[in-house]
Amino acid sequence: MNYQTVWIREETRNHQGHFIPQSEYILVEANCNGWALICADNARCYYVDPEALQFESG
């Protein structure tokens, strides 16, 4: 699969209201419920607001 690398804005929270660590993530999917699933590795994945994502420019 061809996943896209994304970053998150400061003070981004997941769907449970917990802060997400600043890191580089892989965008796995964005669903129709308004959440984006991002993963740092196989063990750390989060649902976040898609508007909190920052994409590579270019």
Image (spheres, rainbow, N blue to C red):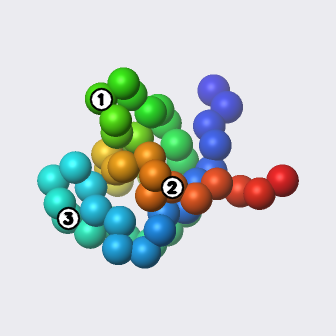
- The answer to whether one can see residue 38 in this image is no
The kind of residue tagged 3 is His
* Amino acid type for the residue under numbered disc 1: Asn
Q: CA distance from mark 1 to mark 2?
A: 16 Å
Q: Is residue 22 left or right of residue 11?
A: right
| Residue 18 numbered tag | 3
Measured as percent of width and height from the top left, residue 37 is found at 39, 41
Residue under the point 51% across and 55% down: 53
Q: Is residue 28 left or right of residue 31?
A: right
Name the secondary structure under disc 1.
Answer: loop
**In the rendered structure, which disc, 3 or 1, sits on the residue that comes first in sequence?**
3
**Residue that protrudes farthest toward the left in the picture:** 16
Confirm or deny contact between disc 3 and disc 1 (CB under 8 A): no
Where does label 1 land, which residue?
A: 33
The circle drawn on residue 56 is: none
At a point 54% along the width and 47% down the height, the residue shown is 26
* Disc 1 to disc 2: CB gap under 8 Å: no
Asked if residue 33 can be seen in this view, the reply is: yes
> CB under 8 Å between callouts 3 and 2?
no
Q: Which residue is mark 2?
A: 53
Crowding at dot 2, Cα within 10 Å, few <14 / some 14-19 / many 20+, comes out as some
Residue most extreme to the right: 58
Judge whether 21 appears above or below 31 on screen. Answer: below
Q: In percent of the image, x 45 and y 58: which residue is there?
A: 52
The x and y percentages for residue 49 are 36, 49
| Above or below for 39 versus 3 | below
Q: Nearer the viewer, residue 34 or 40?
A: 34
Task: Estimate the x, y position of residue 23 in percent, counting from the top left.
Answer: 49, 68
Q: Which corner quadrant of the image does residue 31 belong to?
A: top left
